Amino acid sequence: MDLAPLLKELPPTIQTAIDKASLKEYGRDWTRYYEPNPSAIVFPKSTDDAQKIIQWARRHKIALVPSGGRTGLSGAAVAKNLEVVVSFEKMNRILSFDEVNQCVTVEPGVITEELQNFAKEKGLYFPVDFASRGSSQIGGNVATNAGGIKVIKYGLIRNWVTSLKVVTGSGDVLELNKSLVKNATGYDLRQLFIGSEGTLGLVTEVTLKLTQAPKPANLFLLGVANLDAVMKVFATFRKACDVTAFELFTEKALGHVLSAFSELNRPFETVAPVYLLVEVETVNDESVQTALSAFESGMNDGLILDGVVSQNETQSKNFWRFREDITEALSKYTPYKNDISVTIANVPEFMSEIDRVFQIEYPDLEIIWFGHIGDGNLHISILKPFDLEMPEFVKRCQKVDALLYSTIQKFGGSISAEHGVGLSKKPFLHFTRSSAEVQFMRQIKKIFDPDSILNPGKIFDLTPL
Ligand code: MLT
Ligand code: ZN
């Protein structure tokens, strides 16, 4: 279909792009195993524009892919079938701040870090935080129900969205919840849109509550003896302190970060198989002492091999880099990513079971473990050897996925903790969601998006295979 004359039907406020470079850039996310192939990009500037785009797409049966900072890792924002990408980067204003309610209303294209800085200027805190804070956008965070490094204390973005304005796939504009704290009037449709990966509607306004500025904290970087020791250290700290982050990475992950970023040095001489970043609130001398005692007790029990505690902000930032720079350090290997979760109590047994699977299935491939282990969430990246073709590599990883996900199913876990299903996890959705659940999701999609113009083929296919 020649799209050029159809694009002219859109109101002049909506910019469009069809040049090759833009199509490539806007047609993909951070997954690198799909060829981007959109037919155009449209840039709404308002809810009205978004509604016009939906009406236009329905008229011409054009598939739309909503797009934010394109930092997703499951292909949910990939346009590979001539879809039109709806980029929200021109809807990037902070619209209002309500001091009494401690709420901020933003357009979807606001960058996560900008919102964090805005909250800070107001003496408050927006606690949803992760490594891609500098480029991810609030709309995308809502679409994926973003998590990150502070979930252990503050929860997912779902907990912070008080109101949403959306244009559904049917073209209706809905204002969901209107920032009420209490609202017992039937189904909370707002929650349906959070985590729906752009399959139900275009989010055009988000109201988020902010919270008190975080209390002073200490950050421990610990080398631990083995995977088994991890949750024992977690229990020790959690019993004694207010833990605000509990992150894991392995020596292999650290090795990649150190070789990618020459300005960083090994945190201590001891080489440990696994490292933990443990952030705890330390409001007074007593809580500092309690945290140090937890550390000492881990050392005495032989769980912790070595460790350091940050002495200042700069040191804390550098400690975080060991964890947060892993994704960038690995990017040249175009890793195949698993993002899985089980309940915290199941973590040790689950980890040793999947470790066994990986040793058998991937004896020749390098596997990097890291993640938000205090939430039971592991990111496992399988590095592509440079001489292996991408389709072959993905095929092989997906074969192992089936084994990995059977183990997850046995533990009642999830095939995607925070990156979402998108395209890459779609074939495996049934390991976590029952066929009845998927069928209800299909029916829900049909209600909000009767012509299936919104991100078709993401999360599930409309017709079961
Ligand atoms: C992270 O926790 O660093 C992100 O989810 C990114 C990743 O898994 O690569
Ligand atoms: Zn993560």
Image (cartoon, rainbow, N blue to C red):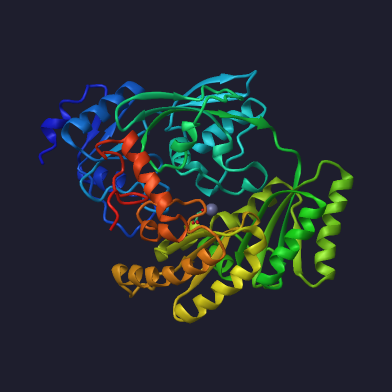
Q: Residue at x 45, y 78 (%)?
A: 361
- On the rendered image, what quadrant is the C terminus found in? bottom left
Residue 393, percent from left and from top: 35, 71
Q: Is residue 303 left or right of residue 250?
A: right
Q: Residue at x 21, y 29 (%)?
A: 56
- On the rendered image, what quadrant is the N terminus found in? top left
Residue 246, percent from left and from top: 67, 55
Q: Residue at x 40, y 43 (%)?
A: 197
Q: Can the viewer see residue 259? A: no
Q: Residue at x 80, y 65 (%)?
A: 298
Residue 434, percent from left and from top: 44, 55
Q: Can the viewer see residue 350? A: yes
Q: Nearer the viewer, residue 50 or 332?
A: 50
Q: Is residue 130 above or below residue 224?
A: above
Q: How many marks?
A: 0
Quadrant of res 10: top left
Residue 454, percent from left and from top: 30, 39
Q: Is residue 168 above or below residue 428?
A: above
